[in-house]
Image (tube, rainbow, N blue to C red):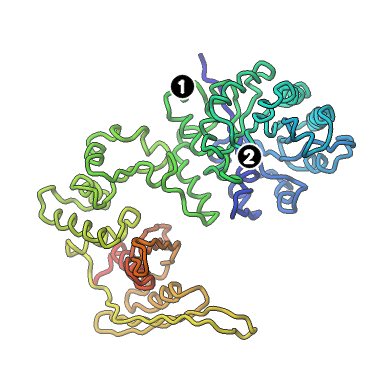
């Protein structure tokens, strides 16, 4: 039996844009559409033309080359024809391959939200689908609140689905809009709907309010649905939508699905899954979810010593799929819970080879455990771990010494009479026999001022750090109370595109930040091959 084709429909740019704190610019939308196009999804839903100027502008030209470009909108309003409805006119004017209508499938919503009769709602579905079909567009209907509607009035929910299909809709999508339906309910209901609308014309649109969006989507596919709607990284209002990244990983790599179902994503595109996931987070200035299935930085990370030892013997002992399949990497973490197996593996990863009997191995392990007892965490700070090891091995030159630094934060009125917070920093360093004093000021905060002052003049090393920049800054409280120990993680980057993370720990947040900044510069100089 040949594999059944499952179509992937991405709604990151429409439903995902409803995520709290997420705002796509026009350039962002174009960039995300290009990412999705290269990934191999079948449909990219771009937004709601006519609802706002940004989406209207986005649909002035097709944003994809391979994927079908879809526009979203409401079915016609009650009391007017489809030909005289401005919303439908905007959809037909959009440069889109497919039109997605949303309609109520729960009789309660029809009466309360729309305040129209059940028959008027069905007429709106039928006439809207027919109008878009007559205009030569592929048509879909999102049956909003379908599962709640089915449980309340199955005959009417089925009538909505049947009406759309008989009017010519290519896809009838069953939406778990409230995200409250459980997998067994989804399976049973989809099987019943498939008796009215063929499975090859059924889709699933699941929200994650019960944490079941991925499970519900997979259950719907097993029950006969052949389109899955979701978003990159599970973006979406409230708790988000079904995570399309996780779904792709499961459908392509799990034995239960990969032999039965075929996607438009090939093996090479699957290998870009981690990159696509993290590229979206970078665009949105969000920290990637380290624990995301298949693509998270911790998805294939092992911390406990006994687990690490087994992974080094055979990765299958603790990995359900190969990390390389999705473009991710295996990582054995260095921590106070780890033993020599973790340490040897991590040293090999950073290019350091030490035998298990090398006495320096015990020194490194003890230093790691001592540091972690103080609040340091090297799991997410590879560069600081690299420097720790290299210092024990005597392979980090004394490039510069910081003799003192000072930071002042002042709140004052600027020249326009506005009340602003202003920071200034002074750093005194010694490079060889040369003493250098640098100052910086600005309104971006004390750490930014320190960063600028420290990198302003490092004498003969200045040319090597010209492309260095601070990418991300994170603060964690290691111990509570008035004497809290603060852990600062700083992610840095350079002109080559390389990124690295360093850590600093202190009861003083500025001191912890400065430690991480110094490590960042030192790491850059070591990797550049600088000598003292």
The percent coordinates of residue 275 (x first, y second) are: 46, 46
In the drawing, does residue 306 fall left or right of residue 177?
left
Q: How many marks?
A: 2
Earlier in the chain: of badge 1 and badge 2, it is 2
Q: Quadrant of residue 503?
A: bottom left
Q: Quadrant of the C terminus?
A: bottom left
Q: Nearer the viewer, residue 512 or 6?
A: 512
Q: Distance from label 1 to label 2 (Cα)?
A: 25 Å
Residue 354 appears anywhere in the view: yes
The residue carrying mark 2 is: 44
- Frontmost residue, 3 versus 494: 3
Residue at x-position 39% and y-position 63%: 490
At numbered mark 1, what does the secondary structure look like: helix, strand or loop?
loop
- 237 vs 469, left or right, is right
Q: Residue at x 59, y 55 (%)?
A: 21
| Whether residue 424 is situated above or below residue 373 in the rendered picture | below
Near mark 2 (Cα within 10 A), the count class, few <14, some 14-19 or many ≥20, is: many
Task: Look at mark 1 in the image and give the residue it sits on.
Answer: 259
Q: Residue, x 49% and y 21% (percent of image)?
A: 260
Residue 263 visible (yes or no): no
Question: How far across and down, in percent of the image, does residue 340 sit?
Answer: 18, 47
- Would you say 488 lies left or right of 21 here? left
Residue reaching furthest top? Answer: 1
Is 246 or 322 nearer to us in this picture?
Answer: 246
Q: Badge 1: few (under 14), some or many (20 or more) residues near its Cα, within 10 Å? A: some
Above or below, 458 against 475 in this view is below
Q: Secondary structure at mark 2?
A: strand
Residue projecting furthest to the front = 481
Residue 265 position in % (x across, y down) = 52, 33
Residue 371 lies, with reference to residue 270, above or below; the image says: below
Image location (x, y in percent) of residue 129: 78, 30
Above or below, comparing residue 339 to residue 504 in the picture: above
């Amino acid at each position: 039996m040949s594999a059944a084709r499952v179509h992937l429909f991405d709604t990151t740019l429409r439903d995902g844009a409803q995520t709290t704190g997420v705002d796509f610019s026009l350039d962002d939308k174009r960039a995300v559409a290009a990412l999705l196009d290269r990934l191999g999804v079948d449909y990219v839903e771009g937004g709601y033309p006519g609802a706002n100027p940004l989406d209207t502008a986005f649909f002035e030209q097709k944003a994809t080359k391979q994927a079908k470009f879809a526009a979203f909108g409401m079915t016609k309003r009650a009391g007017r024809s489809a030909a005289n409805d401005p919303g439908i006119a905007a959809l037909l004017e959009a440069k889109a391959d497919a039109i997605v209508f949303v309609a109520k499938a729960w009789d309660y919503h029809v009466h309360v939200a729309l305040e129209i009769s059940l028959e008027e709602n069905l007429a709106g579905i039928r006439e809207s689908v027919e109008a878009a079909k007559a205009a030569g567009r592929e048509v879909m209907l999102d049956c909003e609140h379908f599962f709640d509607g089915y449980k309340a009035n199955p005959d009417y929910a089925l009538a909505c689905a049947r009406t759309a299909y008989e009017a010519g809709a290519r896809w009838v999508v069953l939406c778990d809009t409230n995200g409250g339906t459980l997998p067994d309910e989804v399976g049973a209901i989809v099987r019943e709907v498939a008796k009215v609308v063929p499975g090859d014309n059924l889709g699933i649109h699941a929200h994650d309010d019960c944490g079941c969006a991925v499970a519900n989507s997979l259950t719907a596919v097993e029950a006969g649905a052949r389109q899955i709607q979701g978003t990159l990284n599970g973006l979406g209002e409230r708790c988000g939508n079904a995570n399309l990244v996780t779904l792709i990983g499961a459908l392509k790599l799990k034995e239960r699905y990969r032999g039965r179902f075929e996607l438009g994503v090939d093996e090479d595109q699957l290998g870009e899954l981690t990159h696509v996931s993290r590229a979206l987070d970078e665009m949105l200035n969000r920290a990637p979810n380290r624990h995301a299935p298949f693509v998270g930085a911790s998805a294939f990370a092992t911390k406990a010593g006994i687990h690490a030892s087994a992974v080094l013997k055979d990765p299958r002992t603790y990995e359900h799929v190969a990390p390389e399949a999705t473009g991710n990497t295996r990582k054995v973490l260095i921590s106070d819970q780890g033993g020599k197996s973790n340490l040897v593996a991590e040293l090999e990863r950073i290019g350091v080879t030490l035998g298990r009997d090398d006495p320096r191995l015990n020194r490194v392990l003890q230093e790691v455990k001592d540091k972690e007892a103080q609040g340091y965490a090297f799991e997410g700070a590879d560069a600081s771990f690299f420097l720790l090891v290299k210092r024990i091995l005597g392979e980090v030159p004394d490039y510069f010494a910081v003799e003192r630094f000072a930071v002042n934060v002042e709140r004052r009125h600027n020249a326009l009479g506005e009340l602003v917070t202003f920071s200034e920093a002074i750093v005194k360093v010694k490079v060889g026999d040369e003493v250098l004093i640098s100052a910086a000021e600005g309104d971006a905060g004390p750490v930014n001022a320190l960063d600028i002052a420290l990198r302003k003049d490092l004498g003969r090393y200045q040319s090597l750090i010209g492309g260095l920049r601070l990418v991300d800054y994170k603060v964690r409280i290691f111990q509570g109370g008035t004497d809290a120990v603060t852990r600062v993680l700083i992610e840095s980057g350079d002109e080559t595109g390389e990124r690295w993370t360093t850590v600093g720990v202190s009861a003083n947040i500025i001191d912890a930040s400065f430690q991480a900044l110094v490590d960042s510069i030192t790491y850059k100089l070591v990797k550049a091959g600088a000598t003292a």
